[in-house]
Every structure is written in structure tokens, then in C-alpha cells.
Image: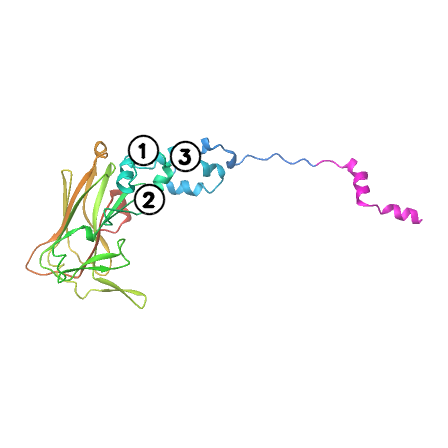
Amino acid sequence: MGANISSIFMDPATARSLFGAFAVPIQQPPRRPTLGDLPESCVAPILANLDPVEICKLATLNRACRGASWADFVWESKLPENYRALMERVLGVEDADGKRISKREIYTRLCAANTIDDGSKKVWLDKTTGGVCLSLASKGLMITGIDDRRYWNHIPTEESRFSSVAYLQQIWWFEVGGEFEFPFPAGTYSLFFRLQLGRTAKRFGRRICNTEHVHGWDKKPVRFELTSNGQYASSQRFLNDTGKWNLYHAGDFVVHKDNDASMTKLKFSMTQIDCTHTKGGLCLDTVLVLPSKFRERLKHF
């Protein structure tokens, strides 16, 4: 009987050899194809029809999308047509050197806020649309009386791209102007002045705006003028919204496709030269040039 009981218990090696002959192999179901199996040459044309933000999101999906997202033809379609002129003007990269840089890297570098002209301007591409945007600092403008501290002062602030704004104490003859040339690609653009009535400060970590010196802007409107390659626009606005930054629309200009390889010259001004009264308490930050289609995104007057 002892022999019969011991025969029930056998070592694992003997069990595998005994029952292995009767085991039925388990068949794995066939693997279904996934997006990762698509070749990069098929994925890249799909990405070319998306905007840059969507391309970057899909690049994290799998290896095929990541590799396709680096294709030059995908990003060249997102760059402005005159991107070579922009590379030279904004990045200081010649066309010959630019051929060694991928189009994705060019797009990335142009989307950064690039400082040019001794720090007086910043230029960048809108990340979604690839539209060219330009900001001109108050220190790059021609301001009547700017050297007389009885009238104007440059004050530091965190609310400006350039870390400072021009503050008007009080003046009789208010005149601000400027002009520059830049290789804007073909399209329609709008020019704005970024202004605030009142002087901003921080107290106990909270933003406050001192408006006690704001005066004179409700008596006569401010006149805005813009000239560009034979085009002219003008408008008049009362400045009456205190305590916050606003964009005041000076005018629009068009860059035609046959001229986008050359420089566009802009001349603009903001004046209130009625000397029957003084005006003051105004902060001047920047002059902005943006594609006109962005106007729907902005609060302007």
C-alpha cells in the first residue's frame, strides 16, 4: 500500500515529461495593426494638414508620428513664404547657413520672442498660425519732451515685454511717433498703441493703479496716423478707460505678395497738440504690429 501512495506523488520533472506529450499548444490571436505601424512617409502628409500645435501633440503619440513630425516639407508649409528674409533679419542666419537647419527648428526659433535692433524690438511668429508679430518698445519711439523729466519718465514694470514703460507726468504738446522697415510677409496687418491711464504699482503683493494725475484726455481726442508704402490711415479716440492696459488701433496696411521679398516701411504717430489744456497720467508701453485677423482676439478701441 505504501508503494501505491508514493506513486501518487512524483517530482515536477517526471510530471512534465509524463503530461507534456498530451498538452495542446495555445495559439495566440494575430496582432492587429496600429497607428505605429504606418510608415513615416504616410503620416507626414497627414501632419502637413494640421496646425503646428496639433502636430506637436501628435508627435507624442508614437514613433512614426514623432519621426514624421520632423519632415522639412511639413514645417515649410507653416513658415511664412519669405522666411529666409526673416531668418536673416531676426535670427542673423544667412540662407546658406539656414540650409543646415531643419525647418522645424527654424519655426521653433522664430516663434520665440526674438530681440533685435539693440533691444528696441521683439519679433515672433504666432505658434498656431505662423503670423508675424512685432513689438516696438517705448524707448524706440520719438517722444516730444522725453529728455525732460518734468514731462516724461521711464519707469520699471513687470507688465511690459521690455520691463519698462514711458510715463507722462504732464505736458501741453503731446506727440509720439516712429518709423522703421521690416520684411513683413504678404498679408494685412494692424498697428496698435498699448496705453494705460494711470501708474501701476504693487502694494502688499496686490496690483494697484494710481490715477490721481490722469487729466486732459476727455477734452480732445487723440489722433492716430499710419503711413505705409503709399497707404494712409488715421483715426481719433478719446482716452477714458483708466487703470488697465488697452490697445488703441491706429490703422491697417497691406503687404502685397509681389512686395513681400522687400522691406515694408512704416511711419506712425499719436498726437494731441491742442495747447489750451495740459494732459497727463499716461503710460506708454509699446507699438504692436499684428496680423489683422488677430483683432478678434484682442480688446481694442
- Residue 282 drawn in magenta: no
112 sits left or right of 301 in the view: right
According to the picture, the residue beneath numbered tag 2 turns out to be 111
Among numbered discs 2 and 1, the one appearing first in the sequence: 1
Q: CA distance from mark 2 to mark 3?
A: 18 Å
**Occupied quadrant, residue 82:** top left
Q: Nearer the viewer, residue 115 or 276?
A: 115
Q: Is residue 144 placed above or below 94 in the rendered structure? A: below
Label 2, label 1: how many angstroms apart (C-alpha)? 21 Å
Q: Name the disc covering residue 71, or none.
A: 3
Secondary structure of residue under mark 2: helix
Is label 1 or label 3 in front? 1
- The answer to whether marks 1 and 3 mark residues whose Cβ atoms lie closer than 8 Å is no
Label 3 sits on what residue type?
A: Ala
Estimate the x, y position of residue 285 in percent, counting from the top left. Answer: 22, 54
Q: Position of residue 178 (x, y in %)?
A: 16, 48
Q: Which residues are magenta?
A: 1-25
